[in-house]
Amino acid sequence: MLKLGFIRSSACRFSPSIVNLSPYPSFPPKQAISFAVRSQMGSFTTLSQSSSRLLFRQLFEKESSTYTYLLADSSHPDKPALLIDPVDRTVDRDLSLVRELGLKLIYAINTHVHADHITGTGLIKGKVPGLKSVISKASGSQADVFVEPGDKISFGDLFLEVRATPGHTVGCVTYVTGDGPDQPQPRMAFTGDTLLIRGCGRTDFQGGSSEQLYKSVHSQIFTLPKETLLYPAHDYKGFTVTTVGEEMVYNPRLTKDEDTFRSIMQNLNLPYPKMIDVAVPANLVCGLQDSKTN
Ligand SMILES: N[C@@H](CCC(=O)N[C@@H](CSS)C(=O)NCC(=O)O)C(=O)O
């Protein structure tokens, strides 16, 4: 299904066609195990992933209420793994879990340049030889690999698709698990700060735009199957996961028409994140402001 590919250097531009970023050869496909997801009026099923090969962990950093996600292909002999949105404070916890589970961490990926905490990507690169940092080209940040909409990030026989979802920042992307017979069902989307559970990212700094965010969610997230599991980069109320179907009905901002949405976003009156002046410059260089090894 996937073309064999190669790791491109940070100077390279990705073609918009299928790109396999995996350093591993293809593995014979297994039969997919899919579960029926029943959804009745007002009732939404949030099954955990049902792929026999996906190992998935949702990890929490409590100071910034950030979720980091660990995904691995547990059926591949090397158990290749990636982390989405690691935080500097919890790098040791995350790497010790990776070791305990016998995984080979190959990518540290960010959904965007965070404003409220420092990414763990740079620290992880210093501790895991060969690991590549990944972020969108549109983010303007440094990394080993720059992705663009439509690119695929492979780990073993699993992959994530890149969808551009600007609005919270210009470079925000959502990573969506693959659409294929051996990929997790239901699909899973890692929305960063674009879509939060019953909310969305603010749009009042870093090139944010409520018009863009509204369009991103409606064209790139709400068009996914309704049972798609949505995993945000933050939650401030104790929620962990939602679905497309649930947010299309209950999201108090994104269910409104665009004018009402714009007005809601203009009147959020949120204080700036406490760490913004430190976090943004650091995250533009992979979280390592004083190092050339980012
Ligand atoms: N109080 C926190 C920052 C809270 C905040 O602004 N969260 C952002 C995502 S992190 S930049 C956001 O978009 N929130 C939307 C919302 O409706 O809460 C801090 O000082 O770090």
Image (tube, rainbow, N blue to C red):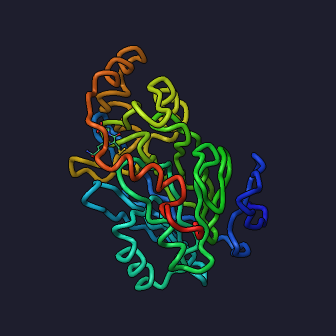
Residue 108 spot, x, y in % from top left: 53, 65
Of the pair 87 and 35, the residue shown nearer to us: 87
Of the pair 117 and 198, the residue shown nearer to us: 117
Q: Name the outermost residue toward the left.
A: 237
Determine which quarter of the picture holds residue 156. bottom right
Residue at (38%, 32%) from the top-left corner?
Answer: 248
Q: Is residue 60 visible?
A: yes
Residue at (63%, 56%) from the top-left corner?
Answer: 180
Q: Name the outermost residue toward the front.
A: 290
Does 69 sit left or right of 136 as displayed?
Answer: left
Residue 86 spot, x, y in % from top left: 43, 63
Determine which quarter of the picture holds residue 32. bottom right
Residue 30 spot, x, y in % from top left: 62, 71
Q: Name the outermost residue toward the top.
A: 259
Residue 246 spot, x, y in % from top left: 34, 38
In the displayed structure, would residue 55 be above or below residue 172?
Answer: below
Q: Is residue 31 visible?
A: no
Which image quadrant: the C terminus? bottom right
* Image quarter for ligand 1: top left
Residue at (66%, 70%) from the top-left corner?
Answer: 29
In the displayed structure, would residue 129 be above or below residue 182?
Answer: below
Of the pair 269 and 71, the residue shown nearer to us: 269
Does 142 sit left or right of 116 as displayed?
Answer: right
Which image quadrant: the N terminus? bottom right
In the displayed structure, would residue 90 be above or below residue 207?
Answer: below
